[in-house]
Amino acid sequence: MQKTELTGTLYIVSAPSGTGKTSLVNALVRDTNHLKLSISHTTRPPRSKEIDGYNYHFIDTAKFKQMQMAGVFMESAEVFGNLYGTSQEAVQKMLDEGHDVVLEIDWQGAEQIKKRFPEAISIFILPPSIAALKERLNGRAQDSDDIINHRMDKAISELKHHHKADYLVVNDDFEEALKSLKAIVKANRMTTAKQKIINQVLINRLIK
């Protein structure tokens, strides 16, 4: 009997700057089999220790707009004056190979993805408090007070979009938040629709 191709699930993780989203997503991908992280394209310059092709695909504005006009991106958005986009081809390739794929994008990109792919699972990361969010932004020691205040204003605005996500995870304790993310992925993989594909041979033997 021919094996049915297993197509992966698309996860969207969004959060305001300073909530620990990147650290959580990296840990989730590291600890979860068959879960891949989509690498976005961006026009912002690399930060210290960031690697092109690993953290982001760093490109100039002209190249980004050329790709945008060519329909390369499944979503794109401007964040703090920089452009970000997700490659449709790269994501689809991983999904077709049976991997689950996680997109770490802002709420604008999340809305675009959900409109095009309503079956995608969206997760919004919440900080435990506004004070904790500001403390985390200050703790980065890489931005001026004006930039931090601007990020705080934007973060508060972004928090108003939390209700559009399928799941909410509060990042008060990192390990607990990570457990919650793993539980979401695990539960989705245990649905009847998924298990009928994964355990097709077993089910056929049981009911023949």
Image (cartoon, helix red, strand yellow):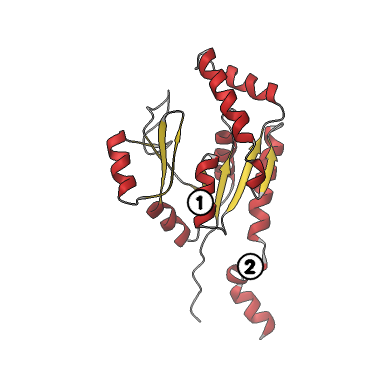
Q: Position of residue 195 (x, y in %)?
A: 63, 67
Q: Residues within 10 Å of mark 1 (few under 14, many from 20)?
A: many
Q: Amino acid at mark 2?
A: Gln
Secondary structure found at label 1: helix
Q: Position of residue 16 (x, y in %)?
A: 58, 32
Mark with earlier residue (1, 2): 1
> Which residue is nearer to you in this view: 116 or 9?
116
Labels 1 & 2 near each other (Cβ < 8 A): no
Question: To which quarter of the image does residue 77 belong?
Answer: top left
User: From this viewpoint, is residue 19 visible?
Assistant: no
Question: To which quarter of the image does residue 118 belong?
Answer: bottom right
- Which residue is tagged 2? 195
**CA gap, disc 1 to disc 2?**
25 Å
> Which residue is nearer to you in this view: 196 or 126?
126
Query: Closer to the observer: label 1 or label 2?
Result: 1
Q: Quadrant of the C terminus?
A: bottom right
Residue 22 as seen in the image, left or right of residue 204: left
Q: Which residue is at 50% across, 44% downward?
A: 109
How many numbered discs?
2
Q: Which residue is at 63% across, 29% downward?
A: 156
Q: Is residue 120 above or below residue 85?
A: below
Q: Which mark is residue 113?
A: 1
Q: Which residue is at 64% across, 38% downward?
A: 125
